[in-house]
Image (cartoon, grey):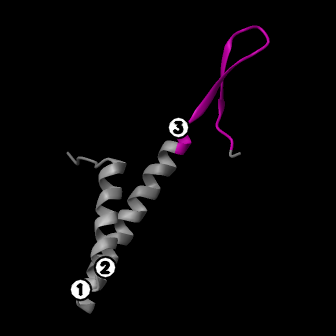
Amino acid sequence: MTKTKSFETALKELEDVVKEMESGELSLEESLRKYETGIKQSRYCLDLLDTIEKKISILTKDADGKIQEKPFEDA
């Protein structure tokens, strides 16, 4: 069974990669590996955000006082 990491964990890992790359202490090969890792973390975070965005809905009441669910719309 695959355990998925939280958005916060993935974002922290991405931030750590960025800090390492910004340090200027990595070789070209290490920088490339970190870049690849960073891209994977970035995509993972974006995929999680996309999934969450699709789940968001706004609950509203209709004229009869009944709660209706409508999809979240970009502002």
Q: Picture coordinates of residue 57 (x, y %)? A: 60, 32
Q: Secondary structure at mark 1?
A: loop
Q: Quadrant of the C terminus?
A: top right
Q: Residue furthest bottom?
A: 28
What type is the residue that disc 1 sits on? Leu
Could you tell me if the residues under marks 2 and 1 are in contact, i.e. CB atoms within 8 Å? yes
* Mark 1 surroundings: few (<14), some (14-19) or many (≥20) residues within 10 A: few
What type is the residue that disc 3 sits on? Lys
Would residue 21 be counted in the magenta stretch? no
Would residue 60 be counted in the magenta stretch? yes
* Mark 2 surroundings: few (<14), some (14-19) or many (≥20) residues within 10 A: some
Q: Picture coordinates of residue 48 (x, y %)? A: 43, 50
In front of the other: 25 or 74: 25
Q: Which mark is residue 26?
A: 1
Q: Residue furthest left?
A: 1
Residue at 23% from the left image edge and 90% from the top image edge: 27
Q: Secondary structure at mark 2?
A: helix
Q: Picture coordinates of residue 9 (x, y %)? A: 29, 52
Q: Which residue is mark 2?
A: 21
> Which one is earlier in the sequence, the residue at label 3 or at label 1?
1
Label 2 to label 1, Cα distance in Å? 7 Å
Residue at 52% from the left image edge and 37% from the top image edge: 55
* Mark 3 surroundings: few (<14), some (14-19) or many (≥20) residues within 10 A: few
Q: Which residue is mark 3?
A: 55
Give the magenta part as a residue range: 53-73
What type is the residue that disc 2 sits on? Met
Residue at 33% from the left image edge and 64% from the top image edge: 14
Label 2 to label 3, Cα distance in Å? 34 Å
